[in-house]
Amino acid sequence: MTLDRRGFLTACSRAGMASALLPGVLYTLATQAQDATGSKELPRITPGLLDDAAALAGVQLTAAQKSMMLEGLADQRSGYAAIRALNIPNSVAPAFIFDPLPTGTKVDVERKKPRWSDIPSIAAPTSIEDLAFTPVRELAELVRTRKVTSLALTQMYLERLKRYDNVLHFTITLTEERALAQAKAADAEITSGKYRGPLHGIPWGAKDLLAVKGYPTTWGAGGFEKQMLDEDATVVQRLDAAGAVLVAKLTLGALAMGDQWYGGRTRNPWNPSQGSSGSSAGPASAVAAGCVAFAIGSETLGSISSPSTRCGDTGLRPTFGFVPRTGAMALSWTMDKLGPICRSVEDCAIVMNSIFGPDGKDLAARDAAFNWDANLDWKTLRVGYFKSEFDPLKPFTPHPAEADETAGQKKQREQRNASRTVAYARRQYDQHFDLAAVDKLRTMGVQLIPVELPKLPYGAMSPLLTAEAAAAFDDLTMTGRDNLLTEQGAEDWPNAFRVSRFYPAVEYIQANRARTLAIRELSKVFEQVDVVVTPTNGEQLVATNLTGHPALILPNGLRGADAPRPPQMDDGNTDDIGGPGTPVSLTFLAGHYQDAKLCAFARAYQEATGFHKLHPRLD
């Protein structure tokens, strides 16, 4: 297979090339690099080639400087093939470790016994399917008291997965044989008096970037459908040890982008004509549809936040380094995070309690304590809010006509204006829910402290992610196997990987230095407050993923019949297009490794509003 020349040239032009010379040469280099024998000579680096490369890098070179550089560049390039010949697997991390903590920060490492909420006696259900949308905390009590068996729960969820997958497309592989064996073992242990804790016997689903022995780990991507990894991911091992029952490997957008995978598009249970968003598409959809009790998702830049918003779930994106990623597909070694997607905040805390802590393999995983206390006095916490995010929206001003615009330019301008007008109306409508949340918090007695997200160029730092992703999947680009991926648009991975090959190493390091400033400045906000309330979307999502701060996303109501109508086409890029009867969300943030406090406060809001008890009507 070969690289698509048109796509490659498009990527280069998007990267800002004024000349077609360098893209053509680089295309030749890429195709020649596919020949593992190394028998083909690489084109000579010339001063003319350097001119185009310098334009791309944004530097100026004199003739003397270019002449001086030629030998060093040739030597540098000669090493590329040797590294590529190593065929480094995705599981091998770079020889550096990202630490999100500012200098001098101390982390609590003393682990305490978790304090779960008190649950009143629960009667056995008339029908096992009545429990489909029941939170883990209540399911656990039913299983513990043997009013319900793990086997019955497991069979019920397996049946629902099969029934609704035809509509929602959230399952890649059912782990039925494994699940039934685990459920029977759980029932036997509980009957004999060996109770492991609140996840014992509880069925769950894994985003299919987590390795599970004996089952394919597809990463949702064409070309990986039959990939078998001979290991269980650390989080899978830990949930096994907690007695949880894995019932399915659930969908993710190909290589953790969006909700489109090689088998189709995962759907939103509240509006199946739309996607569930991604990339934790299957976990969010299956939890919302009452087809698993909880799921494990991952986030690099919105992949728990976005589908939890679309599907009305409660999602915890833990502090970077809290949960080891061993056995999970690597996309960005300095930004990837694993976390639970559940029906309630306490469910997230229950799952988090079983999966956090270092494993000795993921060197970014830190020894820090997650001490859940359902009785924590949340009123003692200092609560801030990003005030400007709750201010009235500035009026939308359409882009004016240009005096000399062509008919085509006029059409494009009118289309952009129409699209932005509709987007403004949706944001304006959804802001009512954000403002209602602020009012509700004040009625709860919360004295909100106005704070602001530090003003830094977070978007300019985000190419760090795609640069690391391009390295993680370098082989796809260099062999042309990226054309097996379903999505091939300008915003999709194949094109993003190609563009990232033009990101200079020096700029990667400079962006990481800017990231250090972001960590320092945002951490100062959490010296003033313990928790920050914010709309889910916006600049904070990029900022906090870069800085590694934890976030808890929870449902914040349903849009009414007067909500703006959804578009006919769902491009999967925005979360506010659901239309009437679909969920909105709210996000809470906290300082590094303050995830338990974050959960305690968010749970208070959730219990006061009850939005997590709403669920879609599927039949």
Image: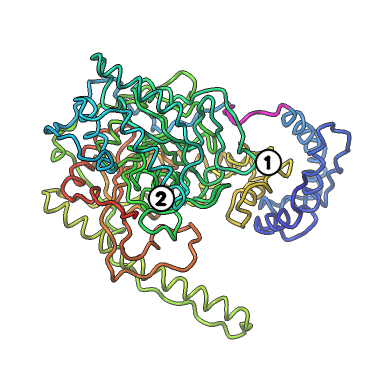
Give the magenta range.
86-94
Q: Amino acid at mark 1?
A: Leu
Quadrant holding the N terminus: top right
Residue 91 on the magenta segment: yes
Whichever of callouts 2 and 1 sits on the residue coming sooner in the sequence is: 2
Question: Would residue 562 be found to the left or right of residue 168 on screen?
Answer: left
Question: Within 10 angstroms of label 1, few (less than 14), some, or many (20 or more) residues?
Answer: some
Mark 2 neighbour class, 10 Å CA radius: few under 14, some 14 to 19, many 20 or more: many
Q: CA distance from mark 2 to mark 1?
A: 27 Å
Q: Secondary structure at mark 1?
A: helix
Residue placed under numbered mark 2 in the picture: 306
Residue 60 x, y percent position in the rendering: 71, 52
Residue 477, by quadrant, is top right
Question: Any mark on residue 476, and which?
Answer: 1
Labelled pair 2, 1 in contact (Cβ < 8 Å): no
Do we see residue 69 in this rendering?
yes
Q: Is residue 449 left or right of residue 354?
A: left
